[in-house]
Each structure stands twice: as structure tokens, then as C-alpha cells.
Image: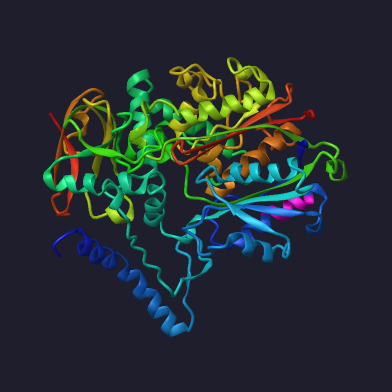
Amino acid sequence: MRNVAIVGVGISRYGYRSDSNLAELAWEAINEALNDAGAGVEDIDTYIVGNTGVWSSEPLPAVVIGEYAGLQPKNGIRVEAACATGLAATRTGYSLIASGEADVVLVVGVEKMNESTTPQVVELIGRAGNYFWEFENFGLTFPGYYAMYATAYMKRYGATEEDLCMVAVKNHHYASLNPKAHFQKRITVEECMSSRYVAWPIKLYDSSPITDGAAALILASEDVAGKFTDSPIWIRSWGYANGTSNLSRRSDFIGFESTVVASRMAYRRAGIDPDNPVKFFDVVTVHDAFTIAEIIGMGDLGLAKRGEEYKLVREEQTYIGGLIPVNVDGGLKGKGHPIGATGVGMIVDLVKQLQQRADKGRQAPISKGMALAHNVGGTGHYVFTAVLSVDKP
Amino acid sequence: MKTVILKLKRFLDGLFEDPLKLVDDVTDSSGLPVVPDQKTGDPIWVDVREIRMRYTIPIKGVYPYIDSLRKGRLAAAKCRSCGKIYFPPQKDCPRCRVSDMEVHYLSPEGELVTWTVINVKPLSFMHHKDYVVGIVRLRDGINVLAWIDIDDPAKLDVGVRMRLVVDKRPDENYITYWFKPA
């Protein structure tokens, strides 16, 4: 297995992008990534498109983007793992290089969610679980699935709706410092608390928005990475796991077993102490599709003791300067959640963090040289975790 | 309109009628199905083709369990070889690698594990008022996800005793199952 470096990153503006179609949006990120790597389309051996689709009109996104970006006849395929599509696509790109199959791979995650109406999108994401047994008769929604975790967690550990809102306040704060983020405004706990319920106890301001966006990476083998950059960021390790499709087949609703399994796999492979991962990372992303997801995610990842995650949030320990900076790009909550782009966008920001070129006001201090990305598909249905490092493994 | 099937179709047709009428008029007068985006004013091409999806789902492998709903019972599948109970029911036991299942009627009594109230509904449930969805652990140790019939969800709590009802859902008029506080 060869080491794999990230030698270029790019990201589109996230948001309500009625100005761009799928391929144009993808190109916005691809072009920035190619520029960042000082590379051309001719340098790319093969490419992976992370896209969930269904709400957007093109059923073959990889060929549409390949033609638009001048990649054809190079081969590219779509990879899909619900909201974890971005890291799933990155893992596939990584494997192509690690195995020796390719030297340079373009990974682009892209989603055009606003080609469909909000009720249609609510329907389509609500079906993401087990359609026949949990949607057909019961009409669950994405916030509804997470709300069942929120109810169980809050009842068991005494966290409040204000605690959940504090996650939204933090993530909006960092989004306001990220010019590419969907939301550019800070919010208060009071504003969050007065927003309407979408799936009690989850409110609108606890929820990531319906976002259009794209993010891209240029991955290179250790043999050729030096051609593109003097400061590559290395993919140190991967972890991945799945949850049951039916939520009813899970035993409790206070965390995702899939995140526990995936993170321990990544930690073991990177030599990280699973009992104290905090001391290894300068900055992390935790998949915050909803505020409760960031809270339980911290416990699942071992960044906080189970049941005490919300206390770290209360004490502002997840801001820069605290115990562990979490989602300082604004997270899914503030930066936006263009499903297929989300995981790729996490990597884009963590690379910039580790290279100390994040936007003003949201650069975490880098002393350990390692970062963690955590990308969840559905409600713990798929989980991918990636450890990035400044030093070559 | 005997059941939810035609009722929902007419509801959805009605929901899209007015906005589509507008696009139809614009297309007729301007020659193209192009309208300004409601939020940004950007020109948007409104798809002139509509896709209608209604899946036909095979249930032969779990038919005894689906059919038991007509008898007012919720059934799981129990592996005759290892005794493992599967709910939702499935035809095959991957543990034993055999497909020898028997119908196991689930206890109608259990305790609430967690719940939510669906306030913002999916398109195909928009004809409903807010509904409560919960997960109940039955006496058999099996979890079942279903609606909870309760006027005031504030009365719910973890551990509240629940009773399963198998019947035709009012308004929708097909057999499904839900919980009521016991």
C-alpha cells in the first residue's frame, strides 16, 4: 500500500445556488482544486463523483461532470453513501492510489438539492433508512429520526434544548467567518429557542439547511505528490462501519455504534489512543446534521465522556481555544449540508487548517499536526472517519 | 376515494395545480418554460416532463407476517433452527444460513423507549396533522416503531406503558398498527 497525499483542495460557495447547475457547481470546486495543486485536467488519471442525486435532474452525474470538465474519455464513477457520500467517495479515490491503480485522482462531491421543492426533499430524505418498514406507514423525516435520539439522550442525561441550541450558536459563529458558508449570520440561543419545531424536540435552528454546493480534492501517490506541492496533507488512516437500516433494530438511542466502530478502526490504524483521542488532534469535524448529532458524535468518537458531551458545549470547550475545536468551518449546521459534497468539504477545510491557511478568526492553533473528519450517512446508517496529518505516515 | 391511495393522488394533484398553471401560462405566452426563481430571480427552466414513481414491492417472502395484520396480529419471524426473532420479519436467517421461519406473534404490551412529533411532514404525509412516532420495546424484547395515538404528547415519557393496536388507520383505511398508552 502506498501513502496518499492531498495536494489540492477546492470548494464552491455553499447555499441556495439557483445560479448554477450540477456541472457548473462541480466545476467551481474542481477548478479551485486544480489551481491549488497547480495541476491540469491532463494530470488526472481517474475521478470519483460523490453525489446522492434523486432531487436533481441528472441521473448520471459522473459522465455529465466528466464531459463538462474536459475529463472525458477518462473514467469516473459516482459513489453514494447518503450523507456520508463525500468521505465514501474520498475513500474510494484513496484506495485507487494506495493500491497502485492510479497516481492522481480527482474527488468531487456535489449536490444540487434545490432542484426539487422542500416537501419533496423532506420526503426523499425521510425515506433514507428502511423505506418499507419505517417510512411507508409512518412518514418519518430526517429530523424525525434524529429527534428520537435527541429525546432519549435528553431524558437520560438531562441535556436541555438550550444545550442543543448552543451547538447551533457556535456553528453559526464560525460560519459567519467562512465566506463559503451557507449561513453568514450569527444567531443567539434565544433566536434558536424561538424557532419552530420541525420534529419535536428538534427545531428549525437545530437543523442543517437544504444546500447546494461542491467540494473537490486532488489526491496523489507519495511517488508524485512532490510534483504538485511542498506541503501535502496525508491521509493517515480510515475507519468505516454501518448501522442497521431499521432504527427499531437498535438497542438504545444515545449514540451510534457505527461511529464507535469506525472511529476505533481509524484510531488503531493511526496509533491513536482510543481512550484519549483529544490529545492527538488540533481540530475535528463532527457530523452535525442536527445539533444533537454533534453532541452524541463527540461521545461516540471518544472526544467526550458519554453523557457529558453537552457539558463541554456549555463550557464552550469546543470553540477554538477550548479543549477541542469542533466544526470551526461552521459545520453542516452553519456551512450547509450539500449531501454529496459535505464529507469532501470537511476534508477541504481540515487541510487548510493543518496548512494554517484557514480564514481569519477561525484558524485553530496547529501543534499536533493531526485532524479528524467524521461523516455520517443517514442516521448512523453509514459512518466514515478519516485521520489527516501534516507528517508523512 | 375509498382509501388513502386515490385520496393522496388527488391531494398531490391539487397541490401542484396552481404553480403548474402559472408555468403553463408563461410557457404559452413566452415560448419557453422559464420563470424567475422565487428567492433570487435567477432564470429557472421548469422541467416540462413529470416523473411519477409508485413502486411495486414483492412481499412473497414475508407474506404470512403481512397477512397476519388482517387477523389483528403483529408477527415477527422466528428461526426454527436457532430461535432468533426477526422484526421486521425476514425470510432468511443469515446466522443459520437456513430459510425455515415460523410466525411468532408479538406481545401487544411494551414500554416507550423514545419518540418524536413530526411537525414538518414529507410530501406524501402532508394531508395529516402532526403525528407522534415512537419506538416501543415489547415484552418479547423486540422493538417496534409506529405511530402513537395520544392527544397530548407532553404526557409521554421513557418507560410509559404502551399497547399495540392492529387496525385500519382512520382516514387512510388500510390495515397498519400503532400504539396507545396502556
Residue B56: quadrant of the picture: bottom left
Taking B98 as reference, is B113 above or below it? above
Q: Which of A42 and B127 is in front in this view?
A: A42
Q: Where is residue A42 in the image (x, y as percent from the top left)?
A: 81, 59
In the image, taking residue A198 as reference, residue B181 lies left or right, namely left
Q: How many labels does the image show?
A: 0
B107 relative to A346, above or below: above
In the image, B65: left or right of A320? left
Residue ID at (14%, 39%):
B165
Q: Is residue A31 magenta?
A: yes
Residue occupying image coordinates x 67% and y 35%: A350
Residue found 25% across the figure and 39% down from its top: B146
Q: In which quarter of the image is the C terminus of chain B?
A: top left
In this view of the protein, can residue A194 be seen by the observer?
no
Q: Name the chief secondary structure element in magenta.
A: helix
User: Where A8 sits versus A258, above or below?
Assistant: below
Instruction: Residue A200: give x, y in percent of width and height.
Output: 31, 36
* Magenta segment: A29-35
Return the x and y of residue A120 as percentages of the image width and height. 38, 57
**Residue B116, located in which quarter of the rendered image?**
top left
Front residue (pair A134, A115):
A134
Quick check: is A390 in the magenta stretch?
no
> Residue at coordinates 47% horizontally, 58% vertically from top-left?
A54
Residue A139 point in image, percent of width and height: 30, 47
